[in-house]
Amino acid sequence: MESQIAHGPDFASLTLRFERAGESVLVEAGAMIARDTDLVMKTQLRGGLGASLKRSLLGGESLFQNTFTATRPGQVLRLAPAVEGEIVQHVLSGSRTLFLQSGAFVACAPEVTLDTKWGGAKGFFGAGLFLLKASGAGPVWFATYGALHEVELTGGEYVVDNAHLVAFEDTLTYSVEKVGGLKSLLFSGEGLVCRMRGTGRVWLQTRSPSSLAWFLHPFRPVKARR
Protein backbone atom coordinates (compact mmCIF):
# COMPACT_ATOMS: atom_id res chain seq x y z
CA MET A 1 0.00 0.00 0.00
CA GLU A 2 1.33 3.44 -0.96
CA SER A 3 0.55 6.44 1.24
CA GLN A 4 0.87 10.17 0.67
CA ILE A 5 0.25 12.96 3.18
CA ALA A 6 -0.55 16.36 1.67
CA HIS A 7 -1.80 19.84 2.65
CA GLY A 8 -0.02 19.81 6.04
CA PRO A 9 0.60 21.11 8.56
CA ASP A 10 -2.68 23.06 8.60
CA PHE A 11 -5.20 20.87 6.78
CA ALA A 12 -3.46 17.54 6.21
CA SER A 13 -5.08 14.72 4.23
CA LEU A 14 -4.02 11.13 3.66
CA THR A 15 -4.20 9.33 0.31
CA LEU A 16 -3.83 5.53 0.26
CA ARG A 17 -3.27 3.65 -2.99
CA PHE A 18 -3.77 -0.12 -2.84
CA GLU A 19 -1.21 -2.26 -4.66
CA ARG A 20 -3.15 -5.54 -4.86
CA ALA A 21 -6.63 -6.98 -4.57
CA GLY A 22 -7.52 -8.08 -1.03
CA GLU A 23 -5.34 -5.43 0.63
CA SER A 24 -7.21 -3.60 3.39
CA VAL A 25 -6.95 -0.79 5.94
CA LEU A 26 -8.83 -0.01 9.16
CA VAL A 27 -10.17 3.57 9.31
CA GLU A 28 -11.76 5.67 12.06
CA ALA A 29 -15.44 6.35 11.39
CA GLY A 30 -16.04 9.66 9.61
CA ALA A 31 -12.47 10.02 8.31
CA MET A 32 -13.20 9.21 4.65
CA ILE A 33 -13.14 12.06 2.13
CA ALA A 34 -13.58 10.01 -1.06
CA ARG A 35 -12.86 6.57 -2.57
CA ASP A 36 -13.07 4.59 -5.77
CA THR A 37 -16.56 3.20 -6.25
CA ASP A 38 -15.49 -0.46 -6.37
CA LEU A 39 -13.46 -0.24 -3.15
CA VAL A 40 -15.36 -2.36 -0.59
CA MET A 41 -16.26 -0.77 2.77
CA LYS A 42 -17.34 -2.85 5.77
CA THR A 43 -18.48 -1.28 9.05
CA GLN A 44 -18.02 -3.44 12.13
CA LEU A 45 -17.37 -3.71 15.84
CA ARG A 46 -13.70 -4.69 15.65
CA GLY A 47 -12.79 -7.22 18.33
CA GLY A 48 -16.41 -7.69 19.37
CA LEU A 49 -18.83 -5.56 21.36
CA GLY A 50 -16.77 -5.56 24.58
CA ALA A 51 -13.54 -4.39 22.98
CA SER A 52 -15.37 -1.81 20.83
CA LEU A 53 -17.20 -0.35 23.82
CA LYS A 54 -13.93 -0.15 25.74
CA ARG A 55 -12.22 1.81 22.94
CA SER A 56 -15.26 4.06 22.52
CA LEU A 57 -16.06 4.82 26.17
CA LEU A 58 -12.49 4.87 27.50
CA GLY A 59 -10.28 5.65 24.50
CA GLY A 60 -12.45 8.28 22.84
CA GLU A 61 -12.71 6.42 19.52
CA SER A 62 -15.83 5.60 17.51
CA LEU A 63 -17.79 2.52 18.51
CA PHE A 64 -17.81 1.33 14.88
CA GLN A 65 -14.79 1.32 12.57
CA ASN A 66 -14.60 0.95 8.81
CA THR A 67 -12.47 -1.55 6.91
CA PHE A 68 -11.76 -0.73 3.26
CA THR A 69 -10.65 -3.63 1.04
CA ALA A 70 -9.33 -3.34 -2.50
CA THR A 71 -10.87 -5.37 -5.31
CA ARG A 72 -8.12 -4.49 -7.79
CA PRO A 73 -4.68 -2.81 -7.77
CA GLY A 74 -4.52 0.98 -8.02
CA GLN A 75 -7.67 1.83 -6.08
CA VAL A 76 -7.47 5.04 -4.03
CA LEU A 77 -8.87 6.03 -0.62
CA ARG A 78 -8.64 9.61 0.70
CA LEU A 79 -8.88 10.40 4.42
CA ALA A 80 -8.74 13.38 6.77
CA PRO A 81 -8.98 13.81 10.56
CA ALA A 82 -11.76 15.72 12.31
CA VAL A 83 -9.55 18.66 13.35
CA GLU A 84 -7.21 20.82 11.32
CA GLY A 85 -3.58 19.85 11.70
CA GLU A 86 -0.95 17.33 10.63
CA ILE A 87 -1.11 13.59 9.95
CA VAL A 88 1.75 11.33 11.07
CA GLN A 89 2.65 7.89 9.73
CA HIS A 90 4.39 5.60 12.20
CA VAL A 91 5.34 2.03 11.28
CA LEU A 92 5.20 -0.48 14.13
CA SER A 93 7.81 -3.24 13.91
CA GLY A 94 6.10 -5.57 16.37
CA SER A 95 8.64 -4.97 19.13
CA ARG A 96 7.33 -1.58 20.34
CA THR A 97 3.92 -0.23 21.28
CA LEU A 98 2.60 3.24 20.53
CA PHE A 99 0.34 5.16 22.91
CA LEU A 100 -2.04 7.76 21.43
CA GLN A 101 -4.16 10.44 23.02
CA SER A 102 -7.93 10.15 22.75
CA GLY A 103 -9.19 11.07 19.27
CA ALA A 104 -5.79 11.02 17.52
CA PHE A 105 -6.27 7.74 15.62
CA VAL A 106 -6.97 7.99 11.86
CA ALA A 107 -6.15 4.60 10.30
CA CYS A 108 -3.95 1.51 10.58
CA ALA A 109 -3.09 -1.78 8.92
CA PRO A 110 -5.38 -4.70 9.91
CA GLU A 111 -2.40 -6.38 11.62
CA VAL A 112 -2.31 -3.58 14.21
CA THR A 113 -4.27 -4.16 17.43
CA LEU A 114 -5.98 -1.23 19.18
CA ASP A 115 -6.69 -1.31 22.91
CA THR A 116 -6.93 1.13 25.83
CA LYS A 117 -4.60 1.81 28.74
CA TRP A 118 -5.27 3.58 32.04
CA GLY A 119 -3.46 6.93 31.94
CA GLY A 120 -3.13 7.41 35.69
CA ALA A 121 -5.44 8.60 38.45
CA LYS A 122 -4.83 12.26 37.60
CA GLY A 123 -5.50 11.61 33.92
CA PHE A 124 -4.43 13.55 30.86
CA PHE A 125 -6.17 16.90 30.53
CA GLY A 126 -7.12 17.21 26.87
CA ALA A 127 -6.35 13.54 26.28
CA GLY A 128 -8.80 11.79 28.59
CA LEU A 129 -8.17 9.39 31.46
CA PHE A 130 -7.29 6.58 29.06
CA LEU A 131 -4.79 6.29 26.22
CA LEU A 132 -5.23 4.31 23.01
CA LYS A 133 -2.66 1.51 22.70
CA ALA A 134 -1.50 0.42 19.22
CA SER A 135 0.57 -2.77 18.98
CA GLY A 136 1.56 -5.30 16.34
CA ALA A 137 3.33 -4.77 13.02
CA GLY A 138 2.30 -2.31 10.33
CA PRO A 139 1.65 1.39 9.70
CA VAL A 140 -0.45 3.59 11.97
CA TRP A 141 -1.65 7.05 10.96
CA PHE A 142 -2.61 9.55 13.65
CA ALA A 143 -3.50 13.24 13.67
CA THR A 144 -2.37 16.29 15.60
CA TYR A 145 -4.28 19.48 16.36
CA GLY A 146 -2.01 22.08 14.77
CA ALA A 147 1.51 21.38 13.55
CA LEU A 148 3.65 18.42 14.61
CA HIS A 149 6.76 18.55 16.77
CA GLU A 150 8.66 15.28 17.24
CA VAL A 151 11.17 14.90 20.10
CA GLU A 152 13.73 12.10 20.39
CA LEU A 153 14.58 11.42 24.05
CA THR A 154 17.90 9.73 24.83
CA GLY A 155 17.60 9.52 28.58
CA GLY A 156 16.88 11.93 31.37
CA GLU A 157 13.53 13.71 31.69
CA TYR A 158 11.31 15.87 29.51
CA VAL A 159 8.21 17.82 30.60
CA VAL A 160 5.20 18.12 28.27
CA ASP A 161 1.91 19.94 28.78
CA ASN A 162 -0.75 17.22 28.81
CA ALA A 163 -2.97 18.97 26.26
CA HIS A 164 -0.08 19.08 23.75
CA LEU A 165 0.93 15.42 24.11
CA VAL A 166 -0.26 13.34 21.12
CA ALA A 167 1.73 10.09 21.19
CA PHE A 168 4.77 8.36 22.67
CA GLU A 169 6.56 5.02 22.48
CA ASP A 170 6.24 2.43 25.23
CA THR A 171 9.98 2.58 25.93
CA LEU A 172 9.22 5.78 27.85
CA THR A 173 7.76 5.96 31.33
CA TYR A 174 5.77 8.92 32.59
CA SER A 175 4.14 10.53 35.58
CA VAL A 176 1.37 13.15 35.59
CA GLU A 177 2.14 16.12 37.84
CA LYS A 178 0.87 19.59 38.63
CA VAL A 179 2.93 22.66 37.75
CA GLY A 180 4.37 24.14 40.95
CA GLY A 181 2.02 24.68 43.85
CA LEU A 182 -1.72 25.26 44.08
CA LYS A 183 -1.42 28.86 42.87
CA SER A 184 0.46 27.81 39.74
CA LEU A 185 -2.04 25.03 39.08
CA LEU A 186 -5.03 27.38 39.28
CA PHE A 187 -3.66 30.59 37.71
CA SER A 188 -0.67 29.76 35.48
CA GLY A 189 -2.87 28.39 32.69
CA GLU A 190 -0.70 25.25 32.50
CA GLY A 191 -2.75 22.77 34.54
CA LEU A 192 -1.06 19.36 34.63
CA VAL A 193 2.09 18.21 32.85
CA CYS A 194 3.50 14.83 31.90
CA ARG A 195 7.07 14.10 32.94
CA MET A 196 8.58 11.66 30.43
CA ARG A 197 11.61 9.51 31.26
CA GLY A 198 13.81 7.14 29.26
CA THR A 199 14.66 6.66 25.59
CA GLY A 200 12.15 6.94 22.78
CA ARG A 201 10.07 9.33 20.71
CA VAL A 202 7.36 11.77 21.75
CA TRP A 203 4.99 13.52 19.34
CA LEU A 204 3.59 16.93 20.32
CA GLN A 205 0.96 19.21 18.80
CA THR A 206 1.32 23.00 18.63
CA ARG A 207 -2.32 23.69 19.51
CA SER A 208 -4.42 22.71 22.51
CA PRO A 209 -8.17 21.93 22.41
CA SER A 210 -8.55 23.10 26.02
CA SER A 211 -6.87 26.43 25.23
CA LEU A 212 -9.26 26.92 22.31
CA ALA A 213 -12.21 26.20 24.60
CA TRP A 214 -11.00 28.82 27.10
CA PHE A 215 -10.50 31.33 24.26
CA LEU A 216 -14.05 30.80 22.94
CA HIS A 217 -15.71 30.72 26.37
CA PRO A 218 -16.28 34.53 26.68
CA PHE A 219 -17.94 34.59 23.24
CA ARG A 220 -20.50 31.87 23.93
CA PRO A 221 -24.17 32.92 23.60
CA VAL A 222 -25.71 33.54 27.00
CA LYS A 223 -29.46 33.57 27.56
CA ALA A 224 -30.55 36.80 29.18
CA ARG A 225 -32.16 36.50 32.59
CA ARG A 226 -35.64 37.91 33.11
Image (cartoon, rainbow, N blue to C red):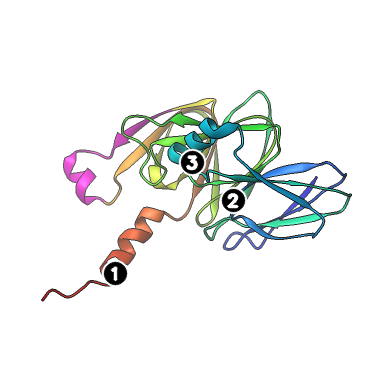
Q: Quadrant of the C terminus?
A: bottom left
Mark 3 crowd level (few <14, some 14–19, many ≥20, 10 Å Cα)? some
Residue flagged by tag 3: what amino acid is it?
Answer: Ser
Q: In which quarter of the image is the N terminus?
A: top right
The residue under the point 49% across, 37% down is 53
Residue 164: x and y in percent read 44, 47
Mark 1 crowd level (few <14, some 14–19, many ≥20, 10 Å Cα)? few
Segment tinted magenta in the rendering: 174-188
Q: Quadrant of residue 119?
A: top left
Disc marking residue 29: 2
* Nearer-N-terminus badge (3/2): 2
Residue flagged by tag 1: what amino acid is it?
Answer: Arg
Disc marking residue 23: none
Please check the rendered image and state whether residue 209 is part of the magenta-colored stretch, yes or no: no
Disc marking residue 220: 1
Q: Quadrant of residue 181?
A: top left
Residue 27: x and y in percent read 65, 47
Q: Residue furthest top?
A: 95
Determine whether, in the image, residue 136 is placed left or right of residue 133: right
SS type, badge 3: helix
Give the label, 1 or 3, closer to the camera.
3
Query: Which residue is disc 3 drawn over?
Result: 56
Residue 61: x and y in percent read 51, 44
SS type, badge 1: loop
Please check the rendered image and state whether residue 177 is part of the magenta-colored stretch, yes or no: yes
